[in-house]
Amino acid sequence: MASEKTDTASFLEATKKAAEAILEIAKRDGFIHVFSHLDADGVAAAGIIGKTLFRLDARLRIRITQWVDEKIVGEILSDKPQLIIFNDFGSGYMQLLNDKLTSFKIIVLDHHQIVGGESEHVVHVNPHLYGIDGAKDVSGAGIAYFVAKAVDKINVDLAPVAVVGALGDLQDKYDQRMLGGLNERIVEDATNAKLLTVEKDLIFFGRETRPIHKTLASTTSPFIPGISGEEDKSLAFLASLDIKPRHGDKWRALRDLSEEEKKRLCSALADYLLSKGLHYEVTNLIGHVYVLSHEEPWTPLRDAREFAVLLNATGRMDRASLGVAICMGDRSSALEEANKVLEEYRRTINKYLGWIMEKPERMKEFENIYVVYGENFINDKIVGAISSILSASLPNPEKPLIAYANVEGEGLAKISARTIDTMINKGIDLSKIMQVAAENCGGKGGGHNIAAGAQVPIEKIGSFIEFVNELVGRQLKGENIGSGNNP
């Protein structure tokens, strides 16, 4: 492998090739169809590419979707765009693109592990091609940003949106929840443009916008048993620490606490989590906070992690156009509507978490994994968020978690797999496990080593789970589990 500097240089060269392809089609007034994944990172990437194309006065359509399938292929064959851009997915579908769409010019901007070979008609920008870790060094939105910057330096003002995408993709895996790798370059661009400031503080959703007790009650990362989802118990917890939730007639947000109050709160939360056996979550209480300084205080766009949750909510609740519009600069009706969607999303998440905790059979422990049986109750578009929340709050967080939900009307189960950094160091690669197990069951899978997903026929879900349990055990023993066609 080439040196890190050479790898980065080659990656940036690839983003320039993608930029050239975009400029060429835009100058010819060609129609550009953008497809993007529905999570926060994918929505942010769509917003970045959408704004870049808008500034070029290009003809475009943006579609947010869960995956690339035959329906998407049919849509492309019908629309006949001059250029197709896949954001935050595509690298796992190279075979499909090579088989069905060879007559189209395609750009794939993705950071997931690659399945299938390269092709002449595809400009493929993926950090894994250059020895860069796509799970923590650059996200889909980050790749979109580097391409946007190569199109025109004016697009540096989209750097904060790329930071939001990276945080939404949980790439803050460096010391004290910091963004590193190529993400650090994006943070530098945003701070140099005076659009972002980086601070150290307690990391909770609602730091800028919510009364403290609501912030504690609405937190799902970390998920605090007995406090998450329970406003009255949150108020009682604060009262026990002599932290007043109001100043006069005004509620106080986390940003309003004194340093001494923050220390007291942090210490008490750490003790509480330890008492519940949640040792891993204690390390996530304090870290780097990314503040979008050009956004209004007391809005959910001010804190980049909160912004990411807002985008994730719009994508998961079938309102992704609102998230894309916000990333492209809309601060009026789209933001107002997205805030309502976010509240509904929060209620939905807490409902699902409560449902799982109600009965032991809804989350079972196997020899090597945990499995959440979401079946027809959990929305397949939200099962990924549920698995992310639960994976670090398990009795044994070193066991990967697999959550699945049925996809209505498609005869498929949507599976989401998550683990923690410790397990990656022990040899676990969920992307490979999902790929091998899914292909063995007539489905498709892939993603990152730490977070991956799959789709398999519903009738195969039992054998899929058993096979995943076996594959995790084999990887922990150091075995090479092969490819999907040769497990």
Image (spheres, helix red, strand yellow):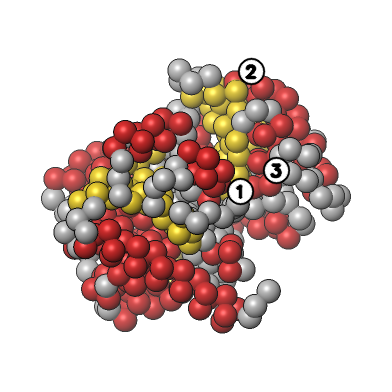
Residue 473 versus residue 49: which sits nearer the camera? 49
Which residue is rendered at x = 55% and y = 61% of the image?
Answer: 134
Callout 3–callout 2 Cβ contact below 8 Å: no
| Residue 383 location (% of width, % of height) | 50, 34
Residue 407 versus residue 303: which sits nearer the camera? 407
Mark 3 surroundings: few (<14), some (14-19) or many (≥20) residues within 10 A: many
Which residue is rendered at x = 35% and y = 38% of the image?
Answer: 76
What's under tag 2, amino acid-wise? Glu
Q: Which mark is residue 433?
A: 3
Which secondary structure lies at badge 3?
helix
Which secondary structure lies at badge 2?
helix
Q: Earlier in the sequence, mark 3 or mark 1?
A: 1
* Real-space Cα separation, disc 2 to disc 1, in angstroms: 26 Å
Q: Earlier in the sequence, mark 3 or mark 2?
A: 3
Label 2, on which residue?
A: 459
Quadrant the C terminus occupies? top right
Residue 191, visible in the rendered structure? yes
